[in-house]
Image (cartoon, helix red, strand yellow):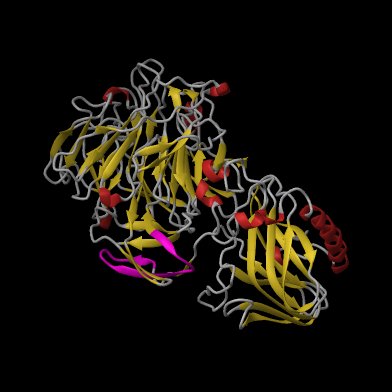
Amino acid sequence: MTAGGAALTPYERPWLSRTDRKRVAQALILAVIAVIAAAVPTGAALASANLVANPGLEGLDSTGFPVCWEKSGWGDQSFTFGLTSPGHTGANAMQITLATSPNGDRKAMMLENPSCAPNVTPGHQYDLSAWYTTTSANTVMTVFRHDVAQGWVYWTDLATLPVTSAWAQKTVRTPQVPANTDQIVWGITIYGVGTLRTDDYAMNDVTAPAAGTSCSAGDACTKGVWQVLPFNSPVRGIHTVVLKNGNVLIVAGSGNDPDAFAAGTFTTAVYQPATGTFVNVPTPADLFCAGHVQLPDGRVLIMGGNKAYPAADGSHGYEGLKNSYLFDPATNSYSRVNDMTAGSWYPSATIMGNGDVISLGGLGEDSSGTVATQYFKTSESRWLGLNEANQTWSFWGLYPSMILMQDGRLFYTGSHVFGNGLPGTGSSIYDYTAGTITPVGGLQNKDQRDQSMSVLLPPAQDQKVITLGGGNINSNPDANRLTDLIDLKQANPAYTAGPLLPTGTLTGGVAETSTQGKMYVSAVLLPDGKVFETGGGLHNRADPVYEASMYDPATTTFTAGMATDPVPRTYHSSAFLLPDGRVMAVGDNPGNGSFDMRLSIYSPPYLFRGARPQILSLPSQQWAYGSTKTVTVDGPVLKAELIRPEAVTHSSDPNQRYVDLPMSVSGSTIGLNLTSNPNIAPPGWYMLFVVGTNGVPSVAQWVHVG
């Protein structure tokens, strides 16, 4: 940004004069030569994956220009910018011709977006190489970096490229990547009269791999990496919803702060990951401990909340609101719909195959348990009256985890909040149409599954659920390591014991014993089909547990020892998948009433295995049930899936699901076959991922199902 604040792209900024560029480049090239001669073997670069997307420039976008590359630069030159054929290899090379060059430059540069920009590790060095020809001595290799606090900033010009009429390869090693840098983009700049051609780019991590591994990214290759963002959330992260535009809705309401409630101070913010900025949103009521779910059109239905905190004289406890609102991502604003039929504090919210929403449980306006089944008719944008909805007059507890099954019934997993589980087996199947509740057996230790978490495992077509951990805030035992698995396709499904959660460490690095586990656990479905398990605490609002693992549904095993979030994540914490394949974590509200406003981002191991696959074309965002949608990709693809964006609070998001898309493959053209069953993929907006044969997922494209 210029001193006057004019908005220029990073590639349009005249960071250095032409003379300064030459001076810096000459100094840097001497430094680079010294680095290359250092201890890291020259051949080490060849052992790691090429991190450049579309390195040969053969994949073209709808404008006919290479995917993940752009025409950029600044100044008053007379220039042409396009493709020439043949390239060094293949059909395409990028070509820039400057007929005049009074100032500025033109660049063949990578796009600065998460899909195209290579991921890097602070402290590591990378060899950057490209094949080129140039008739101008004023040609340099230029690098920008993404700073998590500042955004995209100029980093350096690495080297001046000698004039050559024949194809030549230039390889330059970067300095160590600075702290707080997660991605870089780079390319070749020409700032003098002449013609530049480039092709066949490569980028390799040349940092010495850890002993016994072949991956240069060290522990990141197997454990992933956490990064605490250098800015805090402006609101308490009680509720988080990933919106259809990739932004994140963070709702606090009063944020578990009675003083804020008394003052009428209710807060909401929208986090914009692309820019690292927040938009504060006027909040109409205390939506603390409300329920929420995305509707088919991408708006968020928010139901209930907090009418009152407990009275000092014990005359009442928490009281639930009847209020209900729609949050619109297009306007970042709330609008009110009709009231629910009963107050709801800690209600469930499950979207059905027809796009309607069922809400169960929670506390009513008089602090007693809500026994009404509350039904939101999406086509009419209203809650049905008490006598319009089918009733069983059953109390389901607080935040009961109700997962939609492929036959339209709801599976109550036994995951809940606050105290003991429900009487009986602790889990059941609820048929709204028939008004029946069928007990489900096998759930271990049902009265210590308070703030456990349940998810429908990948893929949703398999109809398998896992329930993880839990405790009990009343009796307050050590939280458990239990997991339970169930196959809902069986005629009479029942839980069976799953593998124990791995052990971790407590505050201060004290190792856990084999009997310890965690409540407040988060479980996030990843694009590679694994489940990332993170966060939690050993006791009620105390003793954070530093442990994270990967659960593989295919092998029913945990891989322990994933990188752990350095921020404690216990009560009122959440973790959720971002469209770029990373996981974000927010919140922590220990028993002293404080709240941790820090935000953390986890990059899973798959982000360190090479370049991301690219979805080159997506003809339509609208997907009908039973249809086949054709996309083109830039290389071999292992699988494709839709992942429903999360709406999570208190270790609960019963709508989280991963829908497999069977593929019909013809070269780079892939037909993706969507299920015909809306109970498998309820209508709404989904993130479409493809996963390359290297196990690396693309950045998501948004599609609408229904």
- The residue lying toward the viewer, choosing from 673 and 302, is 673
Q: Quadrant of residue 507?
A: top right
Query: Is 444 rendered above or below residue 525?
Result: above
- Side of 369 relative to 240 (left or right): left
| Residue 201 locus on image (x, y percent) | 64, 67
**Which residue is depicted at the point 21% across and 39% down?**
373
Query: Is 705 rendered above or below residue 607?
Result: below
Query: Is 521 rendered above or below residue 300?
Result: above
- The residue lying toward the viewer, choosing from 512 and 654, is 512
**Which residue is depicted at the point 32% across and 42% down?**
654
- Side of 285 relative to 433 (left or right): right
Residue 624 is covered by the magenta coloring: yes
Quadrant occupied by the N terminus: bottom right
| Residue 374 locus on image (x, y percent) | 24, 42
| Residue 351 locus on image (x, y percent) | 28, 49
Question: Bounds of the magenta span?
Answer: 621-639
Residue 265 is covered by the magenta coloring: no
Question: Can residue 490 be seen in this snapshot?
Answer: yes
